[in-house]
Amino acid sequence: MSELSPRQRALKEEFTRARGYWSPTWDQVLALDPEFFEAYMNFSSVPWRHGVLEPKVREFIYVAIDASTTHLHASGTRVHMRNALRYGATRQEIMEVLQLISVLGIHSVTHGVPILVEELTEAGRGEELPKPGQGGEREARLKAEFTAARGYWSELWDNVLALSPDFFEAYLRFSSVPWQHGMLEPKVKEFIYIAIDAATTHLYAPGTRIHIRNALNHGATQQEIMEVLELVSVLGIHSTTHGVPILLEELKAAGKG
């Protein structure tokens, strides 16, 4: 790549001031299309210039969406873990972010179980289904334990618990670890859930709604939740940061670099 022009150097300095870091990937994007880079810089910098969340919490949001099982963007995970540490995050806090996002696979169950129930009913086999509320003392205990540990209950869990109490109990223990032993305040935990559910790689509306409601119940403001959504909205830029290095390699291989 040729040396950056004065305008490109100025944009690099402005991005670094606004976002608090620089990555070599941005050199390539900036060199190829300064106007696009400037537009992205202005877009992604809004919550950093006008937002209300702590810088390390912003970085937790980026870590969550990059490390989420629906994305697994290793280079971004590394950049934002490094940034979070620079902003004062602890090992335990970052580990807790990873624990929180590790529950995302449960949406295979909360998405699939209602369909299973509907299809069994449609096939005239509804009598096979255990009914929520008929599981006796164990069902009542597990529901109470989940509500105490996680701070909420949703009807999404009713049929899961009725169909497979053993599985539900195992998930309860798994998902409750960061709530029983964690470092982050409850509303920040809910911000992490909002981020991974609302991310464009997932777009899980039921979970987004539940965790926005939970965050509000834990004292979050509308400005804080809006900022979480603004931070998550930048995920699309990974099409560029993933594609540009490949483009440059292929241009070079074709003798057009």
Image (cartoon, rainbow, N blue to C red):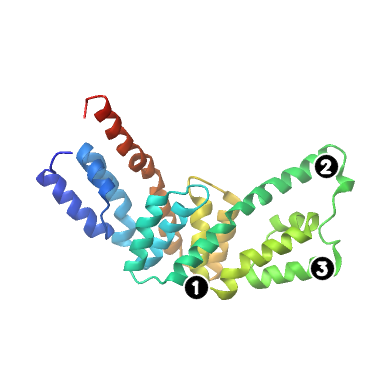
Q: Please provide percent x and percent y for residue 176.
A: 62, 68
The residue located at (49%, 74%) in the rendering is 183
Mark 1 or 3, nearer chain start: 3
**Badge 3 is on which residue?**
138
In the depicted structure, whether residue 202 falls above or below residue 155: above
Q: Residue 142: image x %, image y %?
A: 75, 68
Question: Looking at the image, which residue sits at the far left?
Answer: 6
Question: Counting other residues with Cα less than 10 Å from the Cα at mark 1, is it few (<14), some (14-19), or many (20 or more)?
Answer: few
Q: Relative to residue 99, is residue 245 drawn left or right?
A: left
Residue 133 in which image quadrant: bottom right
Question: What distance separates the C-alpha of mark 2 from that of mark 3?
Answer: 25 Å
Q: Label 1, secondary structure: give it.
A: loop
Q: Is there any visible trace of residue 53 in the rendered image?
A: no
- Foreground: 48 or 91? 91
Mark 1 → mark 3, Cα distance in angstroms: 30 Å
Judging depth in this view, the residue of 32 and 113 nearest the camera is 32
Quadrant for the C terminus in the image: top left
Report helix, strand or loop for mark 2. helix
Q: Position of residue 137 (x, y in %)?
A: 84, 70
In the image, residue 113 above or below residue 62: above
Q: Who comes first in sequence, dot 2 or dot 3?
A: 2
**Residue 245 in view of the camera:** yes
Check disc 1 and report the residue beneath it.
Answer: 185
Q: Earlier in the sequence, mark 1 or mark 2?
A: 2
Q: Amino acid at mark 3?
A: Arg
Q: Say what secondary structure mark 3 lies in.
A: helix
Tag 2 residue? 121
Q: Three-letter amino acid code at disc 1? A: Glu
Give the amino acid type for the residue marked by disc 2 in the picture: Thr
Instruction: Identify which residue, 22 or 184, lies in the foreground.
Output: 22
Residue at 30 percent of width and 38 percent of height: 245
The residue carrying pointer 3 sits among few (fewer than 14), some (14 to 19) or many (20 or more) residues within 10 Å by Cα, namely few
